[in-house]
Amino acid sequence: MAAFAGLASVLAGFFVWGIYSLVAGEIEYQNSRNEFLNSRIAALDKEIAEIKDIKARTKELLSRKETVELLQNSRSEVVHLLDQLVRLLPDGVYLQSVKQVDEDINLIGYAQSNAWVSTLMRNLESSPWLQSALLIEIKAITVNNTRQNEFNMKVRLKRTA
């Protein structure tokens, strides 16, 4: 009976050892799968970071491209502005200052009469490149013993697409 009990305990030990080996093998297999998944996750995280970097650079390049296109489109605006001012300026009016900030243009000048200032405003409104002529101030002054009307007006530049 003792031999039978010894044999049963040896068989039970082998059975426990077999179950333990099986469970340990499954745990090792699952750990290797987890390592593989973690390595793939790390690789994908790296790729995601690269994609975010590429998207940021693409956005920056598109912003630069838009700026260059805007500058390219607005390059001729100064030429058109000066051409329009020369064409639309009546004989009795001359400009002292032309200042542009974005689309707003400030004109300061002298006119022989208020009628010439009105003519200038009508001419500016009829221009295909200018709009919204607004007289800010007009005052009578004496320049070189000649009565003049000093004016200050704003006009907006029409942006083309």
Image: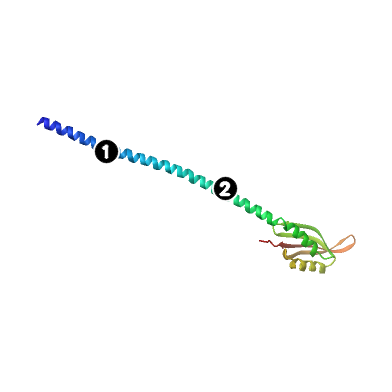
Q: Is 132 situated above or below 78?
A: below
Q: What colouring does the structure picture have?
A: rainbow
Question: Which residue is label 1 attached to?
Answer: 22
- The x and y percentages for residue 64 are 63, 50
Quadrant hosting residue 103: bottom right
The residue type indicated by label 1 comes to Leu
**In the drawing, does residue 20 fall left or right of residue 30?**
left
The residue positioned farthest toward the right in the image shown: 145
Check contact, mark 2 vs mark 1: CB within 8 A: no
Quadrant hosting residue 96: bottom right
The residue type indicated by label 2 comes to Arg
Alpha carbon separation for disc pair 2 and 1: 52 Å
**In the drawing, does residue 139 fall left or right of residue 58?**
right
Quadrant hosting residue 6: top left
Mark before the other along the chain sequence, 2 or 1: 1
- Residue located 21% across and 34% down the image: 14
**In the drawing, does residue 46 fall left or right of residue 111?**
left
- Residue located 13% across and 32% down the image: 5
- The x and y percentages for residue 57 are 57, 47
Q: Residues within 10 Å of mark 1 (few under 14, many from 20)?
A: few
- How many numbered markers are drawn? 2
Q: Which mark is residue 57?
A: 2
> Which quadrant is the N terminus positioned in?
top left
- Residue located 37% across and 41% down the image: 34
> Which quadrant is the C terminus positioned in?
bottom right
What SS does tag 2 mark?
helix
- Residue located 80% across and 63% down the image: 87
Q: Which mark is residue 99?
A: none
Q: Residues within 10 Å of mark 2 (few under 14, many from 20)?
A: few
